[in-house]
Image: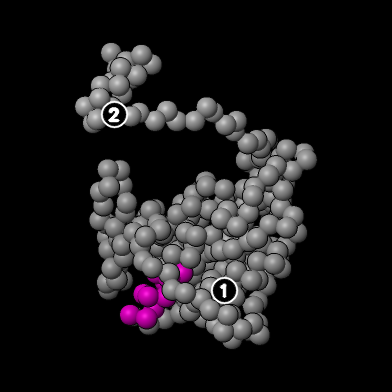
């Protein structure tokens, strides 16, 4: 089983205080602490567990600059066998379609049974996995929280509304967007990172991937960032006090007063 997992280097929201830049069109990125996208971490762990059970290789790939190398090495320390860095000045400013186009170029250069993405990335759009599957003409499932391997097929569970799970059979090769909670990602220690620090990670440019530079990056982006802002804080929540019956009665009156109940 050959599995390609798409990962991304993102600001660590737990370690940073996010502020807008002077132009108001992005967050201030100087001095930010970065880490691997949380959803991608679950995707890598799931890929490793599948390979441990059925054999094969896990490869991690990212679109970014030289600093994204650290994300690849972290996931290799976790258990991925190979890393691939897709880097080119032409990639800067790519929207979701552009990122999917770049990743397709990487998939076309290999031979993969499974391609994983995190369920959420690219500022929460969660669109790259579906776009990549469409470009490859592969079956696709999103919000996957259960995978069972079979003979040329997978049985996958998807998280749907109401806390329910939808089960599907899907043929390989396919693209799956992995939801958090599907597993418990293993701890990565300093020793593991040191062991992969000297491993060569191949880099591919737009030309190497056969990707038209005009179709990606800021020049090819159909979705552009128009404005960033921090929402104004409201007055805060009103805490209701009293017995359960008193709280329920107060809540009903408040809902009626604000048009929530007729």
Which residue is pictured at 38% across the width and 53% down the height? 143
Q: How many marks?
A: 2
In the picture as drawn, the residue positioned furthest to the front comes out as 242
Give the overall secondary structure of the magenta segment.
helix
- Residue 11 visible in rendering: yes
Residue 49 in the image: above or below residue 132: below
In the structure shown, which secondary structural element does the residue marked by tag 1 occupy?
helix
- The image position of residue 206, as x and y in percent, is 69, 63
- The image position of residue 159, as x and y in percent, is 32, 51
Residue 77 in the image: above or below residue 64: below
- Residue 131 visible in rendering: no
Q: Range of the magenta residues?
A: 44-53
| Residue 89 included in the magenta stretch of the image | no
Which residue is pictured at 25% across the width and 48% down the height? 164
In front: 62, or 130?
Answer: 62
In front: 218, or 50?
Answer: 50
| Residue 47 included in the magenta stretch of the image | yes
Residue tagged by mark 1?
A: 74
Residue tagged by mark 2?
A: 242
Quadrant in which the C terminus is drawn: top left
Q: Residues within 10 Å of mark 1 (few under 14, many from 20)?
A: many
In front: 140, or 180?
Answer: 180
Q: Quadrant of residue 10?
A: bottom right
Which residue is pictured at 25% across the width and 21% down the height? 249
- The image position of residue 9, as x and y in percent, is 61, 61
Q: Tell me, yes or no, whether the two marked residues, 1 and 2, touch with CB atoms within 8 Å.
A: no
- The image position of residue 60, as x and y in percent, is 54, 71
> Residue 151 vs residue 206: left or right?
left
In front: 239, or 65?
Answer: 239
> Residue 166 vs residue 184: left or right?
left
In the structure shown, which secondary structural element does the residue marked by tag 2 occupy?
loop
Q: Quadrant of residue 22?
A: top right
């Amino acid at each position: 089983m050959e599995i390609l997992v798409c990962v991304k280097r993102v600001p660590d929201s737990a370690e940073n205080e996010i502020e807008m830049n002077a132009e108001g069109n992005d967050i201030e990125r100087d001095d930010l602490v970065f880490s691997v996208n949380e959803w991608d971490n679950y995707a890598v762990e799931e890929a490793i567990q599948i390979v441990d059970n059925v054999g094969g290789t896990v490869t991690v790939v990212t679109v970014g600059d030289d600093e994204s190398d650290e994300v690849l090495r972290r996931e290799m320390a976790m258990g991925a066998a190979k890393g691939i860095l897709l880097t080119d000045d032409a990639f800067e400013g790519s929207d979701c379609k552009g990122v999917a186009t770049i990743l397709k170029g990487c998939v076309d250069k290999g031979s993969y049974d499974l391609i994983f993405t995190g369920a959420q990335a690219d500022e929460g759009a969660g669109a790259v996995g579906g776009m990549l599957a469409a470009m490859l003409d592969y079956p696709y499932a999103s919000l996957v929280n259960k995978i069972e391997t079979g003979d040329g097929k997978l049985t996958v569970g998807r998280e749907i509304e109401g806390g329910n799970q939808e089960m599907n059979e899907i043929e390989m090769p396919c693209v799956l967007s992995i939801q958090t909670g599907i597993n418990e990602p293993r701890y990565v220690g300093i020793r593991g990172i040191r062991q992969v620090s000297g491993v060569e990670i191949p880099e591919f440019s737009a030309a190497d991937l056969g990707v038209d530079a005009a179709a990606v990056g800021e020049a090819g982006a159909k979705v552009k960032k128009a404005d960033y802002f921090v929402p104004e804080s409201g007055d805060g929540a009103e805490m209701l006090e009293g017995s359960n019956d008193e709280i329920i009665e107060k809540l009903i009156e408040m809902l009626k007063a604000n048009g929530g109940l007729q």
